[in-house]
Each structure stands twice: as C-alpha cells, then as structure tokens.
C-alpha cells in the first residue's frame, strides 16, 4: 500500500530538515496557526485572494521564512539526499544539444557577473522567490502575501546590498531598449502593449536589460503572464484614443468556451468591461473596432453595420470568441 503524499513529504523532506512549519495543504479547511492570508489590490484597498482547492502540487506548500532557511541550506550543502542537489541543478538539453538555463524546478542566471540559480512562484494572493548565489553561499528568500508584489525585484535589491563587494558594475542603459507604449505589429493588427519600459525595470532592479529580460521570462513561466519580443522594423507605435461613442459596443457578450459573460457598459462616458467579480477595466481604441484594456485586445466584428461579437486576445489565449446576447 502507498501513503498520502503529504505524509511522504513530511517523512522524507520536512521532518529530516526540521521544517516544522511546512506541509502540503491538501485540506483547505485545515487550520494553520499564524497563517498569512493572500491579498490583491481592489480599488483603493485590498481584498482577500485565497483558494478553496485541496492541492499538493504547484502552490500547495505552506512554509515559513525560518523553514526556508533550512531548505536553502540543505540545497547548498547537498543535505536533502546525497547527490540530489547536482541533479536538481543540471541544465536541460535540447534535441540540438544546446543547453538551456532551466534545470529541475529552478533556472540558472546571472546578476552583475555572479552566477545565480533559483525560481519564483505565484498562486492566488501569494508571490515568492528563491534566489541563490552558489559561489557566495548566499541565498535570498522572499515571501509576499499580496499579488502585486515583486519578490524577485526585492531579492535583487537585497543582493545588491549584501553582495555589494562581489558584484560587477551596472551596465549603462541603452536608449534603444526604451520601448514604452502601444504598438501595432507590421504583420498584423494586434497591438502589443508594454506598460513599463525594459530600461525602467532594469534600473529598478540594478541590472542590465538582457539579464532583466531573462528574469521576466522566468517570472512569466511561474504565473499567468507572457513576455514577447518584436524586432525593430516589425512594429509601429500607435497612440490609443478615447472612445467617443461607446453605444455600438454596449451589451452582454457570451463565450461558450469559457461559459462566461463579459458586460460592456457606459460609465461616465467611458466604455468599461465587467468580467465576473473583477474590477472594471476601461477600454481605449487602437484602430477601427480594435479596442484594448491593458494587455487584453478586443477585436469587434460587425454585420450590416451592427456589432455582433468580438475575439479576445489575452496573453497566451488568442482568438477567443464571444457573441453578443443583447
């Protein structure tokens, strides 16, 4: 007979490593002393953002900073099981023979001349990051309980302080990477929106743009996000404009794939979309009947002059069809 994974993890991982405040949360009704709730911004305040799922996979571990000290120490000293740390740190290899930065559950990287290895994670209102500098025997663990936190950015800020004497100089920022705004790709009508320039993020994190881009890709892999690049000459800057007359788009639209309704309403003269219990988002016109709200693109279709539906692009999801109900 086998045993529950929670019991196995306690026996093989948590108890030997003295991680007494860690467990796989396979019962959402389980009372956890001193537990921090997760939060997400909403309007001028916050709302709780927790799960009611019973899960043991990604996002299923409850732990503490003290326990994470035991965890990263075991990784550094190969103390989980002899020979395991080198296996976990072995880079993947493509069919072409090329090594990639990703290993087993963690990615190799570099910060100002120092090799790094680690991984971030996110689930509901929680954000986390483990950043290790193996050659310096230094690990930085960042645990946050608000969904708009940037744990990897905070980890870098800490590293810049505690490892200051070991770090190389910050590369000068190239003006060519400043690409903030809304763009239309030359090979299609869909806008690509960048809310913050790569240069600004690099400056905040104290890194060169290339290193930051690698981090952003790793962070995107750990969350519901996507990072895309477009080479110069394949895009054209455009300025979004206000929608002077929202009336053609007002109404409720239904997606059979999502079994969900999106409602478009006129709020103080602006066209906004309500998506379930999420905060409303104001739309702007990109061109014609192509509208955008943040990173979401709505391409409305018409028949005999009237709007009949739209296709939605949102991150990895593209061409999601909605039909107008009223």
Image: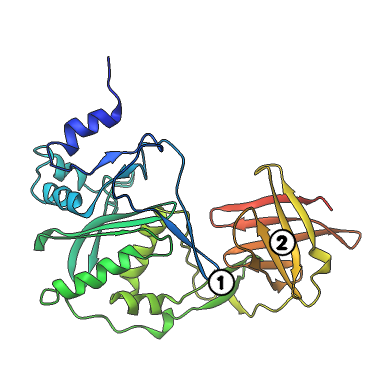
Q: Foreground residue, 259 or 24? A: 24
Task: From the top left corner, tell me how far across and down residue 107 is, in percent.
Answer: 27, 54
Which image quarter: residue 286? Answer: bottom right
Q: Residues within 10 Å of mark 2 (few under 14, many from 20)?
A: many
Quarter of the figure that contains the N terminus: top left
User: What is the x, y in percent for residue 280?
Assistant: 64, 64
Secondary structure under the numbered disc 1 in the rendered image: loop
C-beta proximity under 8 Å, tags 1 and 2: no
Q: Residue at x 40, y 37 (%)?
A: 29
Marked residue nearer the N-terminal end (1 or 2): 1
Which percent across, then down, holds residue 281?
63, 66
Image disc number at residue 80: none
| Left or right of residue 262: residue 46 | left
In the picture, measured across the screen, residue 180 lies left or right of residue 103, that is right
Classify mark 2: helix, strand or loop: strand
Residue drawn at 50 percent across, 78 percent down? 180
Task: Measuring from the top left, give residue 96's x and y in whole percent.
Answer: 33, 47
Please give the label number shown on residue 299.
Answer: 2
Q: In percent of the image, x 41 and y 85: which residue is there?
A: 175
User: What residue did someone put label 1 on?
Assistant: 234
Q: Is residue 286 left or right of residue 61?
A: right
49 to 282, vertically: above or below: above
Mark 1 vs mark 2: in front = 2
Q: Residue furthest right?
A: 304
């Amino acid at each position: 007979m086998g045993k529950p994974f929670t019991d196995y993890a306690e026996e093989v991982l948590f108890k030997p490593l003295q991680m007494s405040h860690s467990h796989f949360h396979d019962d959402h009704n389980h009372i956890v002393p001193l537990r921090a709730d997760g939060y997400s911004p909403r309007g001028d305040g916050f709302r709780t953002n927790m799960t009611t799922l019973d899960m043991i996979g990604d996002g299923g571990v409850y732990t503490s900073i003290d326990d994470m000290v035991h965890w990263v120490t075991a990784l550094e000293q190969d103390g989980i099981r002899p020979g395991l740390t080198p296996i976990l740190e072995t880079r993947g290899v493509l069919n072409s023979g090329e090594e990639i930065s990703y290993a087993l559950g963690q990615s190799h990287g570099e910060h100002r001349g120092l090799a790094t290895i680690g991984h971030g994670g996110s689930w509901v209102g929680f954000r986390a990051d483990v950043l290790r500098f193996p050659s310096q025997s230094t690990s930085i663990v960042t645990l946050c309980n608000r969904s708009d936190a940037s744990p990897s950015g905070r980890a870098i800020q800490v590293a810049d302080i505690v490892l200051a004497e070991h770090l190389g100089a910050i590369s000068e920022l190239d003006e060519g990477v400043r690409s903030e705004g809304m763009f239309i790709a030359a090979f299609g009508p869909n806008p690509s929106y960048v809310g913050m320039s790569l240069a600004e993020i690099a400056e905040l994190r104290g890194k060169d743009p290339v290193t930051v881009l690698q981090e952003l890709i790793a962070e995107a892999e750990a969350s519901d996000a996507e990072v895309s690049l477009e080479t110069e000459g394949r895009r054209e800057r455009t300025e979004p404009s206000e929608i002077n007359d929202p009336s053609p788009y007002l109404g409720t639209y239904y997606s059979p794939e999502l079994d969900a309704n999106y409602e478009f309403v006129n709020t103080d003269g602006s066209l906004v979309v309500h998506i379930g219990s999420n905060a409303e988002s104001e739309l702007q016109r990109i061109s014609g009947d192509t509208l955008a709200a943040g990173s979401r693109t709505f391409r409305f279709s018409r028949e005999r002059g009237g709007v009949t539906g739209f296709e939605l692009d949102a991150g990895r999801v593209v061409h999601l069809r909605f039909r107008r109900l009223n």
